[in-house]
Image (spheres, rainbow, N blue to C red):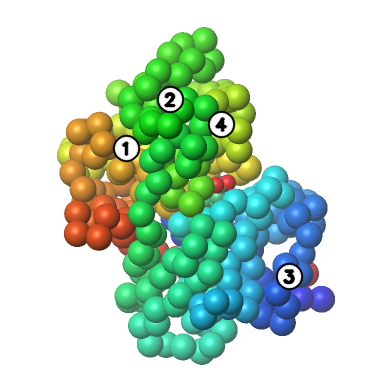
């Protein structure tokens, strides 16, 4: 029997596991698929493990998507992890944590009740870093990609995990359930991809819908919002700081021109706890 806590960041929801007793996840990818099922399980977009730190970090974060695959990083999830470990520690102060992830060390800071600001690191832009087979050895900025019988202009960004961003007139008009999987499994993305459909409302305000690798349509994606802002700056469509409106709520994203890092600020809340 192990204790879990259910958290959400803008409706992107996760099962948090206190895994401080072992350096290996206490739950298998197959069990994660069952637990994430919204009818036969607890229901979530993924399972996140708070493991002991390594290489001088406070904790290690690992995550299994609802399809059991393991991504390198997650934005909404690391905000939830910060609140979770603060509660485990009984830490009420405005804690900052150094978290080891497959995408490197990421530092979330609890800034006020419910809000967490995260230094998400620098975006990677070369095709081989996404990875994608589009424009080898170059950046993929506003390149054509054939999906679902039409050509889309796409920009690719890696925020620890792969993202393919395309700008549309009206995000509500995108048939996400039909188009999303065709981007995710497109042969141009050997490790699959997350796909963001972006509508520019103002230079400092973007509307976004996302089809996530290994999780499908979710209400929000933090790494995706960061990737979308980078794509907006690279294509001259938005400023380096913008609000990104998602179906689950808004994130504030800033791409610093000083240290070239992305800063993401948003909520993370515990919903309930239970036993598995
Ligand atoms: O890269 C992937 O497989 C994503 N589905 C990981 C989860 C990303 C997340 N939604 C986020 O907020 O970045 C947690």
State the CA–CA distance, disc 4 to disc 3: 29 Å
Q: Nearer the viewer, mark 1 or mark 2?
A: 2
With 67 as the anchor, is 72 left or right in this view? left
The residue indicated by pointer 3 is: 24
Residue 4 screen position, x and y as percent: 68, 72
Tell me which residue sits at (38%, 75%) in the image.
110
* 4 or 3: tag closer to the N-terminus: 3
With 241 as the anchor, is 176 left or right in this view? right
Quadrant of residue 51 in the image?
A: bottom right
* 2 or 4: tag closer to the N-terminus: 2
The residue indicated by pointer 2 is: 135
Residue 53 screen position, x and y as percent: 58, 78
* 1 or 2: tag closer to the N-terminus: 2
Tell me which residue sits at (56%, 31%) in the image.
189
* 1 or 4: tag closer to the N-terminus: 4
**Quadrant holding the N terminus:** bottom right
In the image, residue 183 above or below residue 256:
above
Q: Secondary structure at mark 4?
A: loop
State the CA–CA distance, disc 1 to disc 4: 17 Å
Tell me which residue sits at (60%, 38%) in the image.
191
Label 2 lies in ligand 1 vicinity (Cβ under 8 Å): no
Quadrant of residue 120 in the image?
A: bottom left
Q: Nearer the viewer, mark 2 or mark 4?
A: 2
The residue indicated by pointer 4 is: 189
Q: Nearer the viewer, mark 2 or mark 3?
A: 2
Q: Is any atom of residue 57 visible in this view?
A: yes
Tell me which residue sits at (37%, 22%) in the image.
143
Residue 231's label in the rendered image is: 1
């Amino acid at each position: 029997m192990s204790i879990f806590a259910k958290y959400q960041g803008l409706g992107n929801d996760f099962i948090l596991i206190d895994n401080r007793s072992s350096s290996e996840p206490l739950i298998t990818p197959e069990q994660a698929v069952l637990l994430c099922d919204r009818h036969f399980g607890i229901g979530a977009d993924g399972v996140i493990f708070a493991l002991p730190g390594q290489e001088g970090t406070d904790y290690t974060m690992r995550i299994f998507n609802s399809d059991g695959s393991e991504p390198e990083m997650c934005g909404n999830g690391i905000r939830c992890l910060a609140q979770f470990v603060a509660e485990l520690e009984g830490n009420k102060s405005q804690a900052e944590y150094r978290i080891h992830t497959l995408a490197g060390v990421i530092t979330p800071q609890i800034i006020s009740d419910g809000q967490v600001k995260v230094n998400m690191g620098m975006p990677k832009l070369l095709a081989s870093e996404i990875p994608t087979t589009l424009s080898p050895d170059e950046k993929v900025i506003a390149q054509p990609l054939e999906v679902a019988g039409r050509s889309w202009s796409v920009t690719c960004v890696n925020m620890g995990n792969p993202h393919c961003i395309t700008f549309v007139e009206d995000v509500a008009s995108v048939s996400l359930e039909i188009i999303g999987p065709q981007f995710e499994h497109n042969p141009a993305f050997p490790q699959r991809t997350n796909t963001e459909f972006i509508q520019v409302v103002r230079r400092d305000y973007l509307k976004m819908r996302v089809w996530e690798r290994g999780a499908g349509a979710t209400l929000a994606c933090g790494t995706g919002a960061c990737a979308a802002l980078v794509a907006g700056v690279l294509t001259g469509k938005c400023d380096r700081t913008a609000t990104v409106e998602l179906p689950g709520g808004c994130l504030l994203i800033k791409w610093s021109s000083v240290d070239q890092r992305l800063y993401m600020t948003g909520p993370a809340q515990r919903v309930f706890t239970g036993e598995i």
